[in-house]
Structure formats: structure tokens, C-alpha cells
Image (cartoon, rainbow, N blue to C red):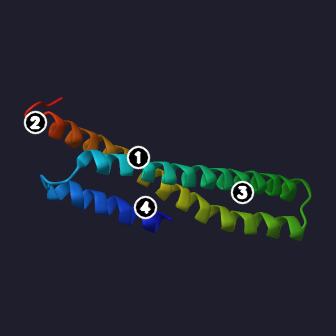
């Protein structure tokens, strides 16, 4: 998913950098809001999954300390191995979505400039 996020961010960045006067910035802004909502939903789902794995890791780590058996130690290790990629993935989604917000602000500025040329906020 974060490859898709990066590709979308790069496409919008290229559009902003091109500064084409024929671009309908308001339409791009509206589409950008739709994309932001998709990525926010994905981010929420991954947050919930990450939290679930973190909770399971915590429980298994406590179980390993309280009942030191091979099974609980292996379970704790396996959950930790799964948790790390989830955290990395969520990190990319979070930071990418934050960058989309900055791009949205720029799109709003461009749409306002097109509606009222010469007027700056």
C-alpha cells in the first residue's frame, strides 16, 4: 500500500511542480480529498492490526516471564518478528498521509489563486 501512496504523492508533486496554468486545481483538490480518505482508512486498519499484535506480544512476553516454557518464548519471538514489519508499514502510511495533508494545503492555495488571481492569503 505504501508503494501506491508514494506513487500517488509523486504524481501530485509532479503536477504541483509543473505549475500548468490549465490545471483545474479545484478538481485535483477534490480528488485529493478522496485519495486522502482512502489512505486514512488504510492507516486506521493498520493501526488496529499493529495494536492487536503489540497487545498479543505484550501478553506473550509476560507469559514467558511468568511461565518460562519454550512455547511461550517461541510465541513471543514470533509475534515480535511480525510486529516489527507492521510498525514499519504503519510508519510509512502515517508519514505519507501527513505529506498528503501538506499537498492538500498547496492544492487549496492554488485553487484559491485561480479563483481570485493576484490575491494571496
Which SS class for mark 2?
A: loop
Question: CA–CA distance between discs 3 and 4?
Answer: 23 Å
For this rendering, which residue is in front, 87 or 100? 100
**For mark 3, does the 10 Å Cα neighbourhood hold few (<14), some (14 to 19), or many (20 or more) residues?**
some
- The residue nearer to you, when weighing 117 against 86, is 117
State if disc 1 and disc 3 touch (CB < 8 Å): no
Q: Earlier in the sequence, mark 3 or mark 1?
A: 1
Q: Is residue 8 above or below residue 111?
A: below
Tell me if mark 1 has few (under 14), some (14-19) or many (20+) residues whose alpha carbon lies within 10 angstroms of its own: some
- Residue at the image position 81 percent from the left and 67 percent from the top: 75
Q: Are marks 1 and 4 in contact (CB under 8 Å)?
A: no
Percent of width and height locating residue 83:
66, 61
Q: Which residue is disc 4 drawn over?
A: 5
Question: Residue at position x 56%, y 51% from top?
Answer: 41
Q: Which mark is residue 102?
A: none
Q: Residue at x 44, y 50 (%)?
A: 34
Query: Residue 88 appears at what percent x and percent y?
Result: 54, 61
Mark 2 highlights which residue? 117
Amino acid at each position: 500500500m505504501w508503494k501506491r501512496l508514494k506513487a500517488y504523492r509523486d504524481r501530485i508533486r509532479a503536477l504541483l511542480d509543473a505549475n500548468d496554468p490549465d490545471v483545474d486545481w479545484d478538481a485535483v483538490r477534490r480528488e485529493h480529498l478522496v485519495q486522502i480518505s482512502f489512505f486514512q482508512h488504510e492507516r486506521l486498519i493498520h493501526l488496529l492490526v499493529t495494536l492487536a499484535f503489540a497487545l498479543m506480544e505484550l501478553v506473550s512476553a509476560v507469559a514467558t516471564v511468568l511461565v518460562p516454557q519454550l512455547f511461550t518464548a517461541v510465541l513471543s519471538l514470533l509475534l515480535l518478528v511480525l510486529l516489527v514489519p507492521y510498525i514499519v508499514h504503519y510508519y510509512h502510511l502515517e508519514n505519507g498521509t501527513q505529506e498528503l495533508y501538506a499537498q492538500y494545503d498547496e492544492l487549496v492555495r492554488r485553487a484559491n489563486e485561480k479563483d481570485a488571481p493576484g490575491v494571496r492569503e
